[in-house]
Amino acid sequence: MKGSRTTLTSSIWDEWTAGPVAEGEKPREEIRGIFEGLHTEERDGGSIVYSSSRLWVFRRLRTLWSSWEEARDFDFASLLSIPPSLKGKVFFRLPPQLLTSLDHESGGRGMEWLKGLWGSCGSLYLPKTGYYLCFRISSKQTEERTVRLLKKKGFSFGKRRIQEKFEITIRNQQEIVDILARFHMFKTTLLLEEKAILRSLRNQANKLVNCDASNIRKSLEAASRQIEIARTVLEFPDYREFPAVLKQLVTTRLENPSATLEELGRMQSPPVSKSTVKYRWKKIESHIAPLSQRRKGAFKTD
């Protein structure tokens, strides 16, 4: 199960990394979202150094780099610092000219921006039941922009402050599928919907099994009680005066200790319904306890 979740998580980020690059201002919009979700390490000669342990973020950034007109004069590799082991934090130095370009408001902050932001500081959690998509944002300003955009697009969400970050969470399954589709992550949406269907089928199967187990337990308990009653009936002084249908029911139960009430009914001559079997058992029970008290009179039955 753990391996399955790991594979699905890898598939999600692989699709985010390899997603199509839009035209016009949208690549810069996505890049802006990526940087707003990264951690700021320090200022270096007017440049800002960003960092993240998510290597795939920088793979995506490299794909977008050539589509960002202002960035074409800067060698991407020279701005990047990757640990030799490929583990730990990756650092990226953003020159002042590019920082100014990103801060420019033209192009806005839409779904491409949100996609970039989610890739750098978001996650999709897959617990045993349901799943939820969240953003963990460091900047109050970025958190406010995210809230405004989600409200504008009609998404419902919750938010809280945790570990000095602003956490925004979407839990509605259909809205999660919708937002991933707007990120052009169609393979992931299909995987999640498939997972939701499998979970639903598994839960339904578990309910049926539990229901069957409960019914079997109740049937066995009822059968055990009826066997006890049947044995007591045989010792009852007036047993010979019992109607034939009640005697037949007692005998059938002793000969078929595991039969259900419905099965006992089919064994009667003529066959009777489950409700009739219940009624006859009540008639028997009402005339055998306590054993020391003799009961006289005729017994009638349906």
Image (tube, rainbow, N blue to C red):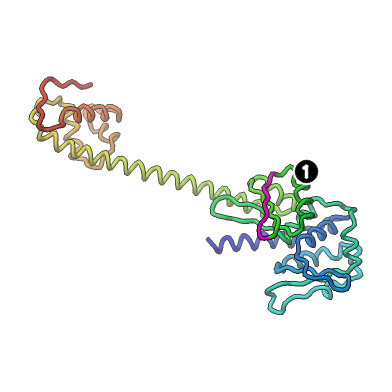
Using residue 230 as the reference point, say whether residue 46 is left or right of it.
right
Using residue 147 as the reference point, say whether residue 163 is left or right of it.
left
Using residue 246 as the reference point, say whether residue 71 is left or right of it.
right
Question: Which residue is more in the foreground, 248 or 209?
Answer: 209
Residue 264 percent location from the top left of the image:
25, 34
Magenta residue span: 156-163
Q: Total number of numbered labels?
A: 1
Residue 145 percent location from the top left of the image:
79, 51
Question: Which residue is more in the foreground, 56 or 189?
Answer: 56
Residue 68 percent location from the top left of the image:
88, 62
Q: In the image, what residue type sits under mark 1?
A: Lys
Quarter of image, res 302? top left
Question: Which residue is more in the foreground, 267 or 205?
Answer: 205
Graded by Cα atoms within 10 Å as few (under 14), some (14 to 19) or many (20 or more), the crowding at tag 1 reads few
Q: Main secondary structure of the magenta part?
A: strand
Q: Residue placed at 15% from the left, 26% from the top?
A: 244
Residue 294 percent location from the top left of the image:
9, 27
